[in-house]
Image (cartoon, grey):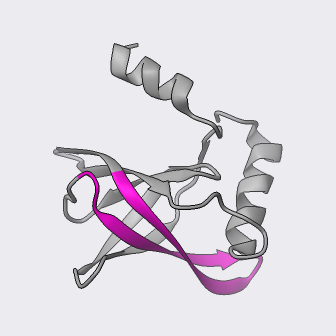
Amino acid sequence: MELDALALHWARRHDRVSLSCPVELRVFPDGPTLRGRTYDISLAGVGLVSEAPLEVGTIVCITFLWNHWQVKTRECVTGHVVSMESDIDGNRLGIEFETVIGQACQPHLAATIRELYILFGAGA
C-alpha cells in the first residue's frame, strides 16, 4: 500500500461499503450538473465516477437517485471534492460530505448505509 493510501486509510473516521447508485452532481455556486455513479460510500463521504473531472476543493451537491424499498426518492448531500483521478475508466472523485449522514436529513441514505454495514460488514 502506498504511503498516501495508507495515510488516507488511517485518517478515515467511517468505514466504507460498496454501493452502486446513479447520482447527479451540481457544482456550486452556478456550475453545471453532471451525471455519475457511486462505487462506495460511508457516513462521511462517497467515491464516485463522474462524466467530467472536477478540481479538488470544488463544492458540489450530490443527489442520490434511489429506487429504495420500491420507493423512488431523491436525497441531496453537500460536500467537497478531496481527490480526483482521471484515466481510461473515467473520472474517479472522492467527496467528503459537509456533515455526517443522519437519519433526520437523509433517511433513505442513512438506512441504506446501515443495511450495507449489516449485510457486508464495514470495509466491504
For image coordinates 19% across by 64% down, the residue present is 52
Q: Main secondary structure of the magenta part?
A: strand
Q: Please report the residue visible at 73 percent of the width from the left and 50 percent of the height from the top.
A: 116
Residue found at x 52% / y 61%: 98
Q: Is residue 70 magenta?
A: yes
> In this orientation, which residue lies closer to the viewer: 73 or 30?
30
Q: Quadrant of the C terminus?
A: top right
Q: Point out residue 14 in the picture as x, y percentages from the top left corner.
A: 65, 40
- Residue at image location 53% in from the left, 52% down from the top: 45
Quarter of the picture holding the N terminus:
top left
Q: Position of residue 41 (x, y in %)?
A: 57, 51
Depicted 51 relative to depicted 27: above or below: above
Task: Please tell me in which quadrant of the rendered image residue 12 appears.
Answer: top right
Q: Is residue 13 above or below residue 110?
A: above
Q: Is residue 104 left or right of residue 4?
A: right
Asked if residue 15 lies in the magenta stretch, the reply is: no
Quarter location, residue 62? bottom left
Above or below, 46 against 117 in this view is below
Count of numbered marks:
0
As drawn, which residue projects farthest toward the right?
118
**Toward which corner of the image does residue 33 lie, by quadrant?**
bottom left
Q: Magenta span covers which residues?
A: 56-81
Can you give x and y, in whole percent of width and height, for residue 2 in the image?
A: 35, 14
* Residue 123 as seen in the image, left or right of residue 69: left
In this view of the protein, which residue sits in the foreground, 82 or 18?
82
